[in-house]
């Protein structure tokens, strides 16, 4: 699976002491988090983790079980990555393109 560093949290982060909020950071820069970039390459043997059930969700039981069995490796993608799950994400990516500074454009 591809592991990426998302850069910034999408949410405000709470520092807690029990139920008392002792710190707050709005959309803090993430320093160590590696998340799934959504790109996968599998060996044929991974098929054993899949269920024919229509409710089988790749990112749930199959991936969780493969990780528990030590059968999942990560490629840490060091370059630019940005999801495009929401209208807001799309607007961000389109603005980078319009402004002539898309970090994913590596050709001239």
Image (cartoon, helix red, strand yellow):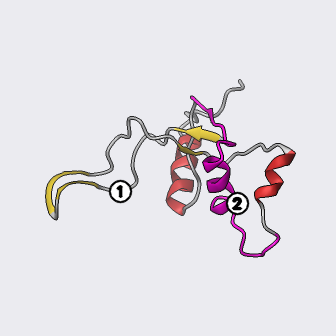
Q: Residues within 10 Å of mark 1 (few under 14, many from 20)?
A: few
Question: What's drawn in magenta, residue-wise?
Answer: 52-78
Residue 65 located within the stretch drawn in magenta: yes
Question: Can you identify the residue that label 1 sits on?
Answer: 11
- Give the percent coordinates (x, y) of residue 36: 58, 47
Query: Which of label 2 and label 1 is nearer to you?
Result: 2
Q: Is mark 1 on a helix, strand or loop?
A: loop
Residue 58's disc is 2
The disc, 2 or 1, on the residue closer to the chain's N-terminal end is 1
Residue 55 located within the stretch drawn in magenta: yes
The image quadrant of residue 101 is top right
The image quadrant of residue 16 is bottom left
* Count of marks placed on residues: 2
Q: Quadrant of the N terminus?
A: top right
Is the residue 106 above or below the residue 85 in the image? above
Q: Is mark 2 on a helix, strand or loop?
A: loop
Is the residue 50 above or below the residue 55 in the image? above
Q: Nearer the viewer, residue 76 or 64?
A: 64
């Amino acid at each position: 699976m591809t592991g990426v560093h998302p850069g910034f949290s999408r949410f405000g982060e709470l520092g807690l002491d029990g139920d008392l909020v002792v710190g707050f950071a709005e959309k803090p820069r993430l320093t160590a988090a590696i998340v799934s970039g959504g790109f996968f390459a599998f060996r044929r043997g991974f098929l054993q983790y899949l269920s024919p059930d229509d409710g089988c969700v790749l990112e749930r039981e199959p991936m969780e079980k493969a990780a528990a069995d030590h059968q999942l490796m990560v490629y840490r993608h060091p370059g630019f990555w940005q999801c495009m799950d929401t209208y807001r994400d799309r607007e961000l990516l389109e603005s980078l393109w319009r402004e002539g500074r898309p970090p994913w454009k590596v050709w001239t």
